[in-house]
Image (cartoon, rainbow, N blue to C red):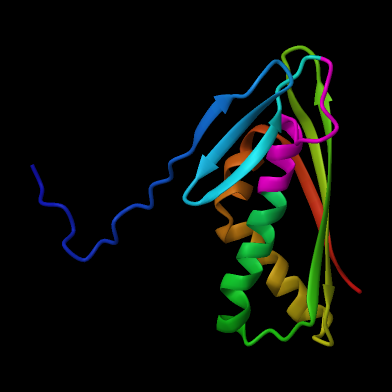
């Protein structure tokens, strides 16, 4: 048996707890945050349903990826917006395709925008979890 690498960083761990509130919603908690979830079979316009939550996780992953790499790349921006659309397939039930737009308010060159997009795709945890099982494609644009 080989010894584990003493210089390896410990793997990140995540913990979320979700409870059913009633037949219309559930509540997920992690750390000191909480989010209402639409778990009503008829839908609940006051909460994210599971598919919308997945798309939100992807958009948050993209923005967090930008926050992570922007200082490394010395990438200057004034703001960022992510728009995500998904199409659900019924049999078997899954997200058939996801399309996204990353809209960056920046004066950086097109090459630098492309570099930022490549970093988003390469280092995003949720992005790389979703990509193998979904037709995932998008673009990065200048505001």
Image coords of residue 13 (percent x, y): 38, 47
Image coords of residue 140 (percent x, y): 82, 65
In the image, 57: left or right of 9?
A: right
Residue closest to the far front = 22
Identify whether 33 is placed above or below 41: below
Image coords of residue 99 (percent x, y): 83, 45
Residue ID at (76%, 37%):
52
Q: Is residue 60 magenta?
A: no
Identify whether 62 is placed above or below 74: above
Name the one closer to the observer, 65 or 49: 49
Residue ID at (82%, 51%):
100
In the image, 139: left or right of 20?
A: right
Residue closest to the far right = 143
**Magenta-tinted stretch:** 42-57
In the image, 91: left or right of 58?
A: right
Image coords of residue 123 (percent x, y): 56, 60
Identify whether 59 is placed above or below 89: below
In the image, 136: left or right of 1?
A: right
Name the one closer to the observer, 57 or 43: 43
């Amino acid at each position: 048996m080989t010894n584990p690498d003493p210089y390896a960083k410990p793997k990140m761990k995540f913990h979320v707890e979700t409870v059913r509130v009633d037949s219309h919603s559930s509540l997920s908690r992690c750390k000191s945050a909480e989010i209402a979830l639409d778990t009503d079979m008829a839908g609940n316009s006051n909460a994210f349903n599971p598919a919308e939550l997945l798309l939100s996780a992807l958009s948050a992953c993209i923005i967090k990826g930008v926050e992570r790499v922007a200082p490394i790349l010395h990438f200057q921006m004034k703001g960022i917006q992510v728009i995500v659309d998904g199409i659900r397939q019924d049999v078997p039930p899954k997200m058939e395709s996801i399309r996204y737009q990353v809209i960056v308010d920046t004066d950086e060159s097109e090459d630098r925008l492309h570099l930022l997009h490549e970093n988003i795709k390469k280092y995003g945890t949720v992005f790389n979890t979703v990509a193998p099982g979904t037709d995932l494609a998008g673009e990065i644009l200048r505001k």
